[in-house]
Amino acid sequence: MIRILLVDDHAVVREGYRRFLERSEDLRVVGEAEDAEEGFRLWTRQAPDVTVVDLAMRGAGGMTLLMRICERAPAARCLVFSMYEDPLVAQRALECGACGYVTKSSQPEVLVQAVRRAHGGQVYLSADIVQGRAALAEDARRLASLSGKEHEIFRLLAQGRSVAEIARLLKLSAKTVANHQSQIRDKLGLATPAALVHLALRHGLIEPSAASL
């Protein structure tokens, strides 16, 4: 029997997934919590085999709960079940100690499979997160193909700087900057200025407040 703790601030979500999980004879929900504080107390008391954690909750969020549990018990099996489909968020959860990440847009059967994999000591990611991580890796490969000068021009373009502004800042001719701009778009496979900005945001190369969309 796999003993599960559910931590999610929506009672309807907890009820629905508790019923679905317990349709499997090998799964049993031994506790439910609506926030990180209650979740940690129940985890300490119940010692579940797998803790299923949402990220967006009132008060301290799911990342905080992950870190608290994994600091106390590094071998604890915590599975994130979240509305966030950003692979960078999933990566952060894994760094905080999660052994898996499933988005709430996944089919319910995926959560069952993830719980079993987590209990078995494996890392599990839902298909959309796997695809997103692959896309990020391809982005990173393309970004690595840029020269140092191209990378700086790329960053400035993503901030919304004009070719003339960049030329002044880098002490280059406008024609040189324009040529680099064309080469950057070719190397990165970007068709529009908006795509360039989104790529820079995904990889943390500019702050959201600096983006020009």
Image (cartoon, rainbow, N blue to C red):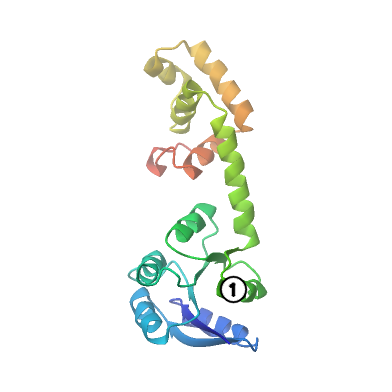
Residue sitting at x 37%, y 82%: 44
Q: Is residue 4 left or right of residue 56?
A: right
Number of marks in the rendered image: 1
Q: In which quarter of the image is the N terminus?
A: bottom right
**Residue 71 appears in view:** yes
Q: Position of residue 130 (x, y in %)?
A: 62, 56
Q: Identify the image quadrant of residue 186.
A: top right
Judge whether 34 appears above or below 202 on screen.
below
Q: Where is residue 141 in the image (x, y as percent from the top left)?
A: 59, 36
Would residue 206 be found to the left or right of residue 108 on screen? left
Instruction: Give amino acid for label 1.
Output: Gly
Please state which of residues 193 and 126 is positioned toward the viewer in this rendering. 126
Residue 110 location in percent, x, y?
64, 71
Q: Is residue 111 above or below residue 140?
A: below
Q: Which residue is drawn at 61% across and 46% down?
A: 135
Q: Residue at x 48, y 27 (%)?
A: 151
